[in-house]
């Protein structure tokens, strides 16, 4: 193992060395050495900007963020992709979002619905084909809701998916049909797709069920997607505490849960990046306040439960939460203590999406492991710096003009060019920010925080810092393993999970212990690489 003597500045320089000057200048703003600036303000990072063409990014597209991420995990809404078959196929169950359909048996998630656009649809338009697909889906399944998702060519040829959906909704009368202008090319990344999905679900679905919901402590869990069963574990804990989860956006959710979200008393935001827009809209329209929670990590789970109990300010709930924590923790602590004998002092790198690269650092910390470097694929500055929007400046969001809402609005709200001094001036002027801890707050001084890490930089970082484990997604999986470093997918969890809550923490400790303690990585070199062939001397008898 290489002994690292490199300073963070050296590493940053190494990463940038190969780029042409213009590229290097832009990338330099997205690679941050985590140090307080002169004014002791958090350092600034450039985020949510377009990837430079030619760079192999790990990001996904707007369609993926809308159809796959936000709408995908709801089992009884029938999702139709209007586009070429590849878009539907590659977003078909790859995210490992689980569901429990035992209540009524309705589950469309194992299906892949698409209009399978062909050349003639591109030339003559695909609206008729879309209407026929919606009709066919309705006739076969009679779902409560049908959602239509635009792919790139739909935006280019101008099919009016909203008009088609409206017409079909009126025709059926008993099925809510609405569409998403989530063409893949819009915005900067999948983040734009989250925003579009948030707006449309809020506009077309939330608030539809006016029958009040039973429960003493009613919450919504926003930004939890039940990957590998995480949501099942969190719901188990809520139930044990006596907390009623009205709706999860959107892991293991149903049409009716979205329709009833306005009946909750508190919104608990887990993945802020993907769902903060719904949290804000629920607050504005229904007066439901939101708090930030994190159920990744046993300590964070306990902290989040206490935060919820504190909000309700009721002794019965506070006592029950303490009882649950006391009951669950001993097993977690025992496993942590055991694995720590092997994991203490080991190092990790995390480059994942828009929240996990931050949340999972808690689990590593519980194992005594240090995060050397981390970053998001597509998060915005507030996810790094822990700032939130100034509600007074919130623009009207129109999902059909994503450049406006994602780029212009972002500048207005989070303003990538706003300096920390300007933030402070706004605060001093009486603007209220919702504070929560961003990635930069949590990471040690001198660590490297890198936005939109690419293939080249990932390989270079591993070569320079040789972490004991690298966490990212499927695109990085095999290139990292070929460098002789164990790799854990923190999107799909490979085939593992749940990792959330108390039981999830135990699973994670054991899995990481297995990976970082394995001897297999020391056998990466073939025998002839280790000890090159001896030169033979040919002797003629
Ligand atoms: S489940 Fe979430 S937690 S929703 Fe988001 S930002 Fe993606 S699909 Mo992949 S694993 Fe990832 Fe987050 Fe929120 Fe998942 S870190 S990239 S869009 N994400
Ligand atoms: C997406 C979904 C994804 C991809 C994961 C990966 C997921 O971005 O479209 O790259 O391994 O979690 O499934 O983030």
Image: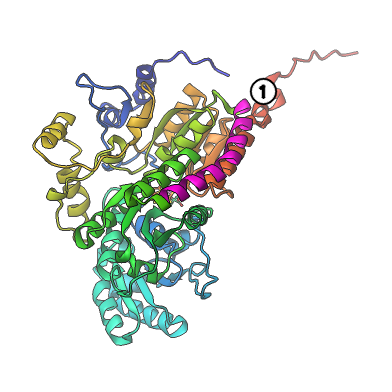
Q: Quarter of the image holding residue 74?
A: bottom left
- Measuring 35% from the left and 80% from the top, which residue is drawn there? 175
Report x, y in % for residue 370.
48, 26
Q: Which residues are magenta?
A: 317-342
Is 112 placed above or below 373 here?
Answer: below
Q: Which residue is mark 1?
A: 529
- Measuring 35% from the left and 67% from the top, which residue is drawn there? 258
Instruction: Say whether residue 133 is magenta.
Output: no
Q: Give the left or right position of residue 343, taking residue 265 as reference.
A: right
Quarter in which the N terminus is drawn:
top right
Report x, y in % for residue 253.
43, 64
- Measuring 51% from the left and 63% from the top, which residue is drawn there? 99
Report x, y in % for residue 91.
45, 59
**Residue nearer the viewer, 301 or 241:** 241
Instruction: Say whether residue 329 is magenta.
Output: yes
Label 1 Cα crowd, 10 Å radius (few <14 / some 14-19 / many 20+): few
Is 225 placed above or below 515 here?
Answer: below
Asked if residue 12 can be seen in this view, the reply is yes
Q: Give the left or right position of residue 433, taking residue 173 as reference.
A: left
């Amino acid at each position: 193992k290489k002994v690292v003597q490199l300073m963070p500045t050296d590493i940053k320089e190494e990463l940038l060395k190969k780029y042409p000057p213009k590229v290097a200048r832009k990338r330099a703003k997205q690679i941050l050495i985590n140090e307080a600036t002169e004014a002791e303000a958090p350092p600034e990072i450039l985020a949510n900007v377009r990837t430079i063409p030619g760079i192999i990014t790990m990001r996904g597209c707007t369609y993926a963020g809308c159809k796959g991420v936000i709408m995908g995990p709801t089992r009884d809404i029938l999702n139709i992709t209007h586009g070429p078959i590849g878009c539907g196929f590659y977003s078909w169950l790859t995210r490992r979002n689980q569901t429990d359909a035992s209540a009524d048996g309705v589950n469309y998630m194992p299906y892949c619905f698409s209009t399978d656009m062909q050349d003639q649809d591109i030339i003559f338009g695909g609206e008729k084909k879309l209407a026929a697909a919606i009709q066919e889906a309705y006739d076969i399944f009679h779902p409560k809701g049908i959602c239509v998702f635009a792919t790139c060519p739909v935006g280019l040829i101008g099919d009016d998916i909203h008009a088609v959906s409206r017409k079909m909704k009126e025709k059926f009368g008993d099925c809510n049909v609405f569409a998403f202008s989530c063409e893949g090319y819009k915005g900067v990344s999948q983040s734009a797709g989250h925003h579009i999905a948030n707006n449309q679900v809020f506009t077309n679905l939330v608030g539809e069920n006016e029958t009040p919901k039973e429960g003493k402590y009613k919450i919504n869990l926003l930004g939890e997607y039940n990957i590998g069963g995480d949501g099942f574990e969190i719901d188990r804990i809520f139930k044990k505490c006596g907390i009623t989860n009205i709706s999860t956006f959107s892991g293991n959710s149903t049409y009716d849960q979205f329709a009833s979200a306005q009946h909750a008393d508190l919104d608990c935001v887990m993945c802020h990046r993907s769902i903060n827009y719904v949290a804000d809209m629920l607050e504005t329209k229904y007066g439901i306040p939101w708090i930030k929670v994190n159920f990744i990590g046993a300590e964070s789970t306990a902290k989040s439960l206490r935060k919820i109990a504190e909000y309700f300010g009721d002794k019965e709930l506070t006592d029950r939460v303490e009882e649950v924590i006391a009951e669950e923790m001993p097993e977690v602590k025992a496993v942590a203590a055991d694995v720590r004998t092997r994991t203490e002092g080991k190092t990790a790198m995390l480059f994942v999406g828009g929240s996990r690269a931050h949340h999972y650092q808690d689990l590593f910390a519980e194992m005594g492991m240090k995060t050397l470097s981390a970053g998001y694929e597509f998060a915005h500055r507030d996810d790094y710096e822990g700032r939130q929007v100034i509600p007074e400046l919130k623009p009207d969001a129109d999902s059909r003009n994503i450049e406006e809402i994602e780029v212009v609005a972002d500048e207005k709200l989070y303003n990538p060019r706003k300096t920390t001094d300007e933030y402070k001036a706004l605060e001093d002027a009486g603007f209220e920010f919702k504070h929560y801890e961003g990635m930069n707050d949590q990471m040690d001084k001198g660590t490297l925080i890198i936005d939109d890490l690419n293939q080249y930089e990932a390989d270079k970082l591993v070569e320079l810092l040789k972490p004991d484990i690298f966490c990212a997604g499927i695109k990085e999986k095999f290139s990292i393993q070929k460098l002789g470093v164990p790799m854990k997918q923190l999107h799909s969890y490979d085939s593992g999970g749940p990792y959330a809550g108390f039981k999830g923490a135990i699973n994670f400790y054991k899995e990481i212990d297995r990976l970082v303690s394995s001897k297999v990585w020391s056998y990466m070199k073939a025998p002839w690489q280790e000890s090159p062939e001896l030169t033979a001397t040919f002797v003629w008898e």
